[in-house]
Image (spheres, grey):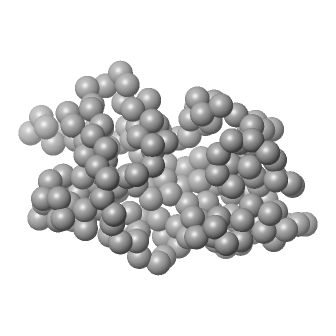
């Protein structure tokens, strides 16, 4: 089974390959710029971009949108995480959350679409907290402040493999089951 994954993010490809490693799935990376609507809702953003890519490429595609949902900020930044990472930065979120509930989660929405159909979505959630300070290490700004549940380190203090072990793979496995069932009909 081949999945055309529309993303420029090598980490998303690495994670998908890791999850599908023992399944009969081959990930084909497709480099296509897609429009991203402005919304806090990752599913809405993912579905819109997925449908666009499917129609543009005229083949089934997978598109992903993820975001950081901070409970004390009523779900902000959500799907606007990348924009906020570039503007507010990790330091800004640490400051915003001083004296507040630091619980949060990463949401990852995989949307799959075939020509002439509406996208279907699958969601994974990785729970955690925001650290009290920005911690140095590898990765993006959010990696320097996100501490996954059941650990004390931020993602930036982990190897890519360690970080990947914390991500909820539910959405990928549900997508696989969905595609397998379609294949067997």
Residue 21, given in percent of the width and then of the height, sits at: 37, 25
**Quadrant in which the N terminus is drawn:** top left
Q: Is residue 78 visible?
A: no
Left or right, 46 with reference to 151:
left
Q: Is residue 125 visible?
A: yes
The residue located at (44%, 29%) in the rendering is: 18
Left or right, 79 with reference to 70:
left
Q: Residue furthest right?
A: 99
The residue located at (13%, 37%) in the rendering is: 183
Q: Residue furthest bottom?
A: 38
Q: How many marks?
A: 0
Residue 163, given in percent of the width and then of the height, sits at: 62, 36
Residue 148, given in percent of the width and then of the height, sits at: 69, 43
Quadrant assignment, res 164: top right
Residue 153, given in percent of the width and then of the height, sits at: 78, 38
Quadrant assignment, res 147: top right
- The residue closer to the viewer here, 29 or 46, is 29
Residue 57 vertical position relative to residue 4 in the rendered view, above or below: below
Q: Residue furthest left?
A: 185
- The residue closer to the viewer here, 8 or 23, is 8
The residue located at (68%, 48%) in the rendering is: 143
Left or right, 105 with reference to 32:
right
The residue located at (23%, 57%) in the rendering is: 113
**Quadrant in which the C terminus is drawn:** top left
């Amino acid at each position: 089974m081949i999945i055309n994954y529309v993303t420029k993010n090598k980490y998303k490809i690495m994670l998908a390959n890791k999850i599908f490693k023992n399944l009969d799935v081959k990930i084909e990376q497709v480099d296509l710029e897609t429009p991203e609507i402005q919304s806090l809702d990752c599913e809405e953003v993912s579905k819109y971009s997925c449908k666009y890519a499917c129609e543009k490429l005229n083949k089934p595609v997978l598109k992903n949108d993820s975001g950081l949902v901070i409970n004390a900020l009523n779900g902000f930044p959500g799907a606007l995480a990348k924009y906020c990472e570039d503007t507010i930065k990790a330091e800004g979120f640490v400051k915003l959350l001083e004296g507040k509930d630091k619980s949060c989660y990463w949401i990852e929405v995989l949307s799959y679409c075939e020509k002439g159909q509406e996208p279907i979505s699958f969601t994974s959630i990785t729970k955690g907290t925001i650290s009290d300070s920005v911690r140095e290490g590898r990765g993006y700004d959010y990696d320097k402040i996100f501490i996954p549940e059941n650990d004390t380190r931020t993602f930036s203090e982990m190897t890519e493999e360690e970080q990947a072990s914390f991500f909820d793979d539910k959405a990928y496995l549900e997508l696989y089951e969905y595609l397998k069932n379609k294949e067997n009909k």
